[in-house]
Image (cartoon, rainbow, N blue to C red):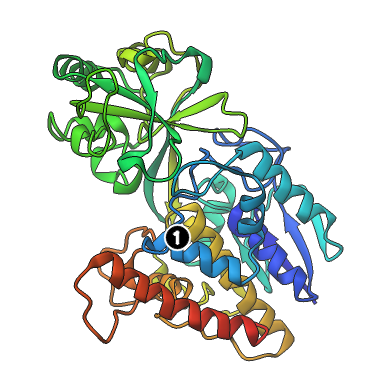
Amino acid sequence: MTVKVIGAGLAGSEAAWQLANRGIDVELYEMKPHKMTPAHHSADFAELVCSNSLRGDRLENAVGLLKEELRRCGSLILACAEEARVEAGGCLAVDRQGFSRLVTEKIRSHPNIRIVSQEVTQVPQGPVIVATGPLTSDALSQAIGAYFGQTGYLHFFDAAAPLVTAESIDMDLAWWQSRYDRGTPDYINCAMDKEQYQAFVRELISAEEAEVHGFEDKNVFEGCMPVEVMARRGPDTLRFGPLKPVGLTDPRTGREPYAVVQLRQDNAAKTVFNLVGFQTHLKFGEQKRVFSLIPALHNAEFVRYGVMHQNTFLQSPKLLDRYYADRRDPLVAFAGQMTGVEGYVESTASGYLAAVAMAAKVQGRPLPDFPKTTAIGALGLYISDESVENFQPMNINFSIIQPLEKRIRKKAEKNLAIAQRSLEVIDRLAASGI
């Protein structure tokens, strides 16, 4: 039996790989390069918007736990990320082009996967996993809405930060340091004094935005809020957010700066850097004008400006089960951000779980039991929890994982204990041949 997978982003690539590794023939449909979206820049699979899209890698962080679970379960995405890794303190940052190229090569060389380069405009009959992501084409988006008998999905908006060249950063005004000096000094820090910061915020608030149909501040997902929207929430909002100076010391003064913009490497060669937390939908000319007010970026060369995308997601608790499958038809599953998991790692986890469950169904085996004590299981249970009111996209976090039976006061110790409990379950599942 052949399983169709629609979309070769992180969720779709992971799903295709897991199915194929279980001896199942896979038809992987991807509309690139014949049809591209504003977020697509190459024909490769599993594109990322920035080098740090996979986020933190410590077990006391929930996303770090999720990544470790996926590693132990044989995730393609995590294996390729490790191979394309670049230094970024406690984060799993990658060379984006190298990462996507690795995923593409692995997928294309697998004997059980056939690539079909065409746009899908209808929900196919099962077995199928639809993983077309937040930028699902209009035709398929309408078809999914019709499939579920609703006029549309919910929507939110996602933003990507601009990139600058390393050689254009004024290192007489910037310095290398990781916050609290953790790990190697992997971030370039650009300080502002009070006057510079206030002038920057004034210009940011008044800068002209690009037109994004239907955009309203209340629709912005909190985890990737445009920097200009954040600035409107109060004069010090940025100083307590992406521009917080805590844990950093300006070597020119020996003191903590008033505000700091951090830059993170975006490729292995360290020739391009990402403005951390500077997702935006300002017009391109306004981005250059306003962001060049950051003293160390006064001559910055922008190799990519920030862009704003409309993301689409399902009312999953009403529609999907804990394995991301249609409650009415278990052989039709969905994966990725359209299900309401937010983030690349979470999307990968949804593709993984949808695939291992689909493999069990078509091969007549029991469904794998990923409990709420695991991050993988907790995500699936969150998006399928019918008791959730006002369902919104969710990053993995410890609040949706089953709490410990015993109380541990220190947060880091508690989180590590939750992680240890989870990984014991994951190891048992992996040993059972899920």
**Left or right of residue 53, residue 78 in this image:** right
10 shown above or below 85: below
Q: Residue at x 68, y 62 (%)?
A: 5
Snapshot quadrant of residue 422: bottom left
Circle 1: is it few (<14), some (14-19), or many (20+) Cα within 10 Å?
many
**Quarter of the figure that contains the C terminus:** bottom right
Which of 75/258 is in front? Answer: 258
| Corner quadrant of residue 388 | bottom left
**Residue 331 shows in the view:** no
- Nearest the camera: 195 or 4? 195
Image spot of residue 17 (x, y percent): 71, 64
State whether residue 233 is above or below residue 8. above
Count the labels in the image: 1
Q: Residue placed at 35% from the left, 76% from the top?
A: 417
Instruction: Residue 34: give x, y in percent of width and height.
Output: 73, 38
Indicate the secondary structure of the residue bearing disc 1: helix
Pick whichever, 314 or 22, lies toward us.
22
Residue 235 location, x and y as percent? 13, 28
Q: Quadrant of the N terminus?
A: bottom right
Q: Which residue is mark 1?
A: 64
> Farthest residue in the right direction?
111
User: In the picture provided, is 90 more to the left or to the right than 404?
Assistant: right
Q: Farthest top residue?
A: 299
Residue 395 higher or lower than 400, as above or below: above
* Residue drawn at 57 percent across, 86 percent down: 428
Residue 77 seen in this snapshot: yes
Q: Residue at x 38, y 15 (%)?
A: 297
Q: Nearer the viewer, residue 10 or 272?
A: 272
